[in-house]
Image (cartoon, rainbow, N blue to C red):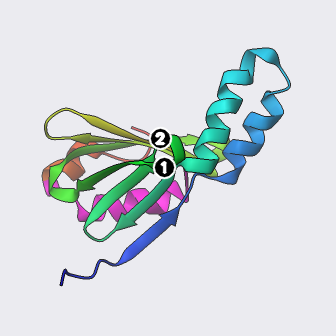
Amino acid sequence: MGIKEEVYYEGGPHIGDLIINLLLGFTVIALPLTVGAIVRAFWLRYRITDRRISVSSGWMGRNRTDIIYPEVAKVVTVPRGLGLWGDMVVTLKDGSRLELRAIPKFRDIYDYINGKLSNRAQKASGSIGN
């Protein structure tokens, strides 16, 4: 029997990402962005707990990536959609990166994740938008 994890956030990307990209889809140039947003809306799911960050993605959501907080070296965020959602890049100690796109309440989620990191990772992450 494992230790129960407290879920802070569980869900998909912000709906605004899909809406804006659908509107942009009326232009042929933005069609690839629209397809990407549709795929994210259907098959991308985030789960942020007190122990880990989990991302389910890929075709039918079959790929899953789990990161525990001690592995994180740095977290950087970029606001999108007038600040209603944002993208987050989590860099691990081995140099690999995990990108979380169109995160709703990304500032709150960043603060939550940052609170779970080591002091060194917190200093490397800096403030939102750096």
The residues bearing labels 1 and 2 have C-alpha atoms spaced at a distance of 5 Å
Residue marked by disc 1: 61
Residue 12 in the image: state x and y as whole percent. 56, 56
Q: Nearer the viewer, residue 70 or 25?
A: 25
The residue segment tinted magenta is 103-119
Is the magenta region chiefly helix, strand or loop?
Answer: helix
Amino acid beneath label 2: Gly
| Horizontal arrangement in the rendering, residue 94 relative to residue 122 (left or right) | left
Mark 1 lies on a secondary structure that is: helix
Question: Where's the N terminus, which quadrant?
Answer: bottom left
Q: Nearer the viewer, residue 79 or 102?
A: 102
Residue 92 in the image: state x and y as whole percent. 21, 41
Residue drawn at x 42%, y 62% is 47
Query: Mark 1 touching mark 2, by CB under 8 A?
Result: yes
Above-or-below relation of 52 to 79: below
Residue drawn at x 28%, y 54% is 66
Residue drawn at x 66%, y 23% is 32
Numbered circles on residues, count = 2
Res. 11 in view = yes
Res. 102 in view = no
- Direction right: furthest residue: 26
Queried whether the magenta region covers residue 115, the answer comes back as yes
Residue drawn at x 25%, y 64% is 116
Queried whether the magenta region covers residue 104, the answer comes back as yes
Question: Where's the C terminus, which quadrant?
Answer: top left
Residue marked by disc 2: 58
Residue 70 in the image: state x and y as whole percent. 15, 56
Mark 2 lies on a secondary structure that is: loop
Residue 85 in the image: state x and y as whole percent. 59, 50
How many C-alpha atoms fall within 10 Å of the one at disc 1: few (<14), some, or many (≥20)?
some
| Horizontal arrangement in the rendering, residue 71 relative to residue 64 (left or right) | left
Name the disc covering residue 40, or none.
none
